[in-house]
Structure formats: C-alpha cells, structure tokens
Amino acid sequence: MKLIFSFSLLVVLLSVSSCELKIQKPFKFVPEVADIDTYENQTVWEWLQTQKTPAGAAVIDQFKFDYLIQAIEYTGLIDEFNRKGDKRTFLLLNNNAFDDPNKIFQALTGTVAGPVSRADKTRLTNLLKYHIINDFVEQNNPLKVIAADYFFQTLNDGDTGKILLRRDERYTITVNPATVPPLSSSRRGTTVRTHNLRYSNGIAHVLNDYTRNIAF
C-alpha cells in the first residue's frame, strides 16, 4: 500500500513540475561567418608592412608577419602581393608558421632558427606561390556545402599546384585535409586561424602552419 501511495505521489509531483516548465526558445544557429576586418584601401603587401613585431621587442610576435615579409622580399614576389585590382585569395603565413619545429624554416633550412636567407630561393618561391589561390574564396562562397571538396589552382602550375579547401558546419576552413587526388601522399594539411581579411587586391585567411601538395 505504501509503495502504491509513494508511486502516486511521485506521478502527481512530476505532473505539477512539468506544468511549470517554460517552453524552450527555438535555437538559432549562427555560423561564424564575418568579415574580421576590411582593408580595401590597402593591398595585402601594404597591410603587411603594419604587421611587424615592434622594434625593440624582446621576442618576435608569433602572430605577426616579419618572416613572411622577409620571404616575399627575398624571393622577389612583392608584385604578387601588391598588384591593385587582383581578386585572389592569400593564405598568409604568420611567424609561427616559420619558426616552430617541423615548419617552414626547419623544412627549408634544417633549423628552426632560419634565417630566411638560408632557404633555397626556388623552393621558398614555390612555397609562397602555393599559398596564393587564383580565385576569390570566402568562408561561405564558393564553399557552400559542408565537408565538400573544393579544389582550386594556386600560382603553381598543373596538378602539383592544386589545393583543396573544405569548410565545416561552423564555416571553419581546412586546407588539404585529406589525400584526395590530385593531392599527393606527401600533402600537408592545416586549419585557417583567421578568416576573411579583405584588401584592394583580394581576400586573405591567416595560417599558423604551411600547407603543400608535394614537398617543396
């Protein structure tokens, strides 16, 4: 009898409690798609000049672009980053992409310390050109389908210059995430750190690591 009474009481309490619950508001998913900043009065190259570690700093700022600037000057590619009217996509390599273990300096110079001038100029040129896509690529255009493979041509010719972009449900872009032909087994993938920086000569996304199809 006690068991029946206890069960009945529980049912009553649950019924009362459920009547007092507020209706949950519908959840609206907001993708992380936004123009972080626009610099449409500047080319990528002009903007990069403002993104150096301040003089006298004790250590280099890993999220600035000192090494990329040096690499562009060393390889003679300034015009590719400075031509007004272009509508390209630039995958900008911050300092962290150069001087961390197993990154650009170690791959091209054998040491994480570099410097840029120690790298083979042809190999470094090919690396930088692979990080410039001939098309204008935003997070949501033309990357419209979640997890779909979108191939683009970089400034490097042929299949070795192909690059693969995917975006997830939050519109984060990954670069060369899998070995999908014509990507080779030596491809290297990474994830975009900062999206949608707009300039007078295109759009840029920032990388903490370099990417590749074949080894440079």
Image: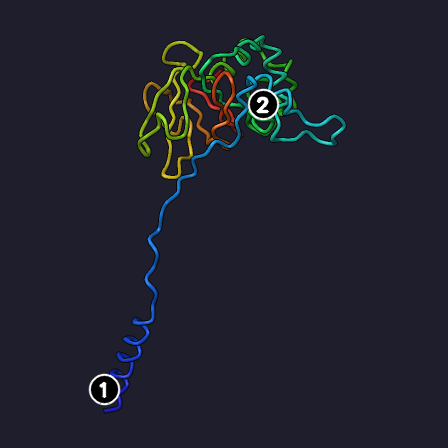
Residue type at tag 1: Ile
Toward the bottom, the furthest residue is 1
Which numbered marker is on residue 4? Answer: 1
Q: Which quadrant would residue 32 be assigned to in this image?
A: top left
Q: Picture quarter containing residue 76?
A: top right
- The amino acid type found where label 2 is placed reads Gln
Question: Mark 1 Cα within 10 Å, few/some/many (few <14, many 20+)?
Answer: few
Mark 2 surroundings: few (<14), some (14-19) or many (≥20) residues within 10 A: some
In the image, is residue 76 above or below residue 24? above
- Colour approach in the figure: rainbow
Q: Residue 200: horizontal and vertical position, in percent?
A: 51, 17
Q: Quadrant of the N terminus?
A: bottom left
Instruction: Point out residue 56 in the picture as x, y percentages from the top left corner.
Output: 76, 28
Instruction: List x then y, in percent, for residue 25.
Output: 35, 56
Horizontal and vertical percent position of residue 191 = 46, 32
Q: Between marks 1 and 2, how big is the CA–CA gap? A: 75 Å
Q: Is residue 128 above or below residue 19?
A: above
Depth check, mark 1 against mark 2: the one in front is: 1
The residue under the point 40% across, 17% down is 135
Which residue is depicted at the point 59% across and 14% down? 72
The tag earlier along the polypeptide, 1 or 2, is 1
- Taking depth in this image into account, of 38 and 111 the one nearest to the observer is 38
- Name the residue beneath numbered marker 2: 106
Instruction: Judge left or right: residue 120 versus residue 168.
Output: right
Q: Residue drawn at (36%, 13%), measured in percent from left and top?
A: 159
Q: As drawn, is 12 to the left or to the right of 108? A: left
Residue in the foreground of this view, choosing between 89 and 106: 89
Question: Label 2's element?
Answer: helix
**Number of numbered markers:** 2
| Helix, strand or loop for disc 1 | helix
What residue sits 38% from the left and 32% below the top?
167
